[in-house]
Amino acid sequence: MYKNKKSGIIGIIVTIVILIVIVFLSNVEVGQLSDAQNVFTSLIMPVQNGLTYLKNKLSGNDSFFTDINRLQEENEELKQKNKELEESLRELEITKNENERLTELLGLTEKYSNYTTIPAYVINRDMNNYSNMIVIDVGAKDGIKENMVVIADKGLVGHVVSVSDTTAKVQTIIDPSSTVSSTLTTTRDNIIVRGSIEGESRLKGTYIQPDVLIAEGDSIETSGIGGIYPKGIHIGVVKQVIPTKNTTDRYVWIETAVDFTKLETVLVIE
């Protein structure tokens, strides 16, 4: 109550001072108004500021500014902690991804244990309508040579076309210039599978004999005939059969088993 009484007295004093100034200014001519304003600013304002500060002190308002400063400091500390947590989360995510890739490689090696293989990661891609190449992180120093076959978990990727000491370029089966001698797993009939500019996960199956029964969903694998690819590696499945007037010209669209847009780990068959 004492504090409230003091605050009230100071408020009355401030009000009286302001009224005196208003009366003073109302009796001053317009030409002298500028001078009066200067007097008001230089003499009265410091007194008013002092009284306002004293009033805030007595009523406890100064603690508001102290709280603001403390909150700003706490906010900066929280920002720093949040930054540190984000960095830790990023590191954990990197470690998790690396573990997943290593696990995938291990599973891939076990799946193709009948082959002697060299594991590798995809480190670069050249994927467009006219070229579909990838670069892997193993090369001549790792025993990689041209024409070695490259596979992934789901099936055939392609073959090595050039080698440096530490990297190798692989022509994928979806490259427009790629050709693979293949077999229908249902009838064991042979067809030729080519890369296409029609889509990243699409192959064109041609040279289908007129008497060959082929349908959507049929599985395609390497035939092992007349090429570098060993027999029995999965390529994909028939998605669409395209009939033509001349039955010797009919062809099929094949969806690749491997998703080349997400390919990260591969094996090179020695």
Image (cartoon, rainbow, N blue to C red):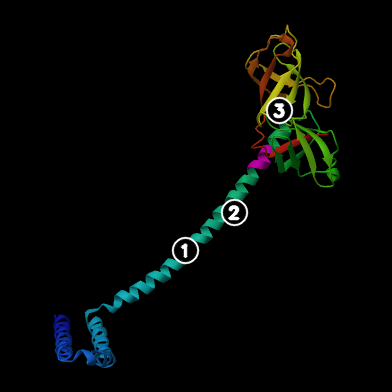
Which residue is under mark 3?
A: 196
Q: Earlier in the sequence, mark 2 or mark 1?
A: 1
Marker disc for residue 79: 1
Q: Which residue is mark 2?
A: 91
The stretch of residues the image draws in magenta is: 100-104
Task: Of the two numbered discs 3 and 1 on the same chain, state the one appearing first in sequence.
Answer: 1
24 horizontally vs 76: left or right: left
Residue 42: x and y in percent read 29, 92
Amino acid tagged 3: Ser
Can I make out residue 142 in this image?
yes
* Front label number (3 vs 2): 3
What residue is rendered at 68% in x and 18% in y?
252
- Left or right: 122 as drawn, with respect to 226: left
Q: Nearer the viewer, residue 195 or 231?
A: 195
Give the percent coordinates (x, y) of residue 207. 76, 15
Q: Quadrant of residue 136?
A: top right
Which quarter of the figure is the C terminus placed in? top right
